[in-house]
């Protein structure tokens, strides 16, 4: 069975991460840019966790901490590598990271029409919160 390791992303990973998200995260957010990923890595070097197999990104999750709660984004596993423990290992690493920072709860954003994503989060013990919806406003850049 192929092996993989979990590690924090670096600036050197940015282009590979963007390409990986286009493939494995169903290109759900076309607002992702190299500059934005670099800002994330610079601000919180441990937030973007990668599963890497021989220098190839096979999984990712962003474990963001705002000082109050943990937020999980961009959780994805390469389609050919699903059901091999990569997703579980990424989530466990993200949850440990958030707990070390003081988070007592983590949430995940999942698009309503992402049936696979909803199944994955449900299978990993996360439950949909039905009493609120997210409100979004683009900010000037």
Image (cartoon, rainbow, N blue to C red):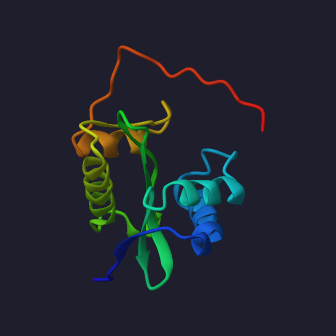
* Position of 2 relative to 127 (above/below): below
Q: Quadrant of the N terminus?
A: bottom left
Using the image as rendered, state which of residue 133 and residue 98 is in the foreground: 98
Using the image as rendered, state which of residue 79 and residue 59 is in the foreground: 59
Q: Quadrant of the C terminus?
A: top right
Q: Is residue 27 visible?
A: yes
* Position of 2 relative to 122 (above/below): below
Q: Residue at 33%, 23% (x, y): give it.
A: 129
Left or right: where does residue 24 sit relative to residue 129? right
Quarter assignment of residue 20: bottom right
Q: Pinpoint residue 29: horizontal percent, then vertical percent.
A: 63, 44
Left or right: where does residue 114 sit relative to residue 103? right
Using the image as rendered, state which of residue 41 and residue 49 is in the foreground: 41
Q: Residue at 39%, 71% (x, y): give it.
A: 7
Q: Pinpoint residue 66: horizontal percent, then vertical percent.
A: 43, 38
Left or right: where does residue 6 sit relative to residue 112? left
Quick one: which residue is furthest to the right in this view? 141
Q: Pinpoint residue 91: horizontal percent, then vertical percent.
A: 31, 54
């Amino acid at each position: 069975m192929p092996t993989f390791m979990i590690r924090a992303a670096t600036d050197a990973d940015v282009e590979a991460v963007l390409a990986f998200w286009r493939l494995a995260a169903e290109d759900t957010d076309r607002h992702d840019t190299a500059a934005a990923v670099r800002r994330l890595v610079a601000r919180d070097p441990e937030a973007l966790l990668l599963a890497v197999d021989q220098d190839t990104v096979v999984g990712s999750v962003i474990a963001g901490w705002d000082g109050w709660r943990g937020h999980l984004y961009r959780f994805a596993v390469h389609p050919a590598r699903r059901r091999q423990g990569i997703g579980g290992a990424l989530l466990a690493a993200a949850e440990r990271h958030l707990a070390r920072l003081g988070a007592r709860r983590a949430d995940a954003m999942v698009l309503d029409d992402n049936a696979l994503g909803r199944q994955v989060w449900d299978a990993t013990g996360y439950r949909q919160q039905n009493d609120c919806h997210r409100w979004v406003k683009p900010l000037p850049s």
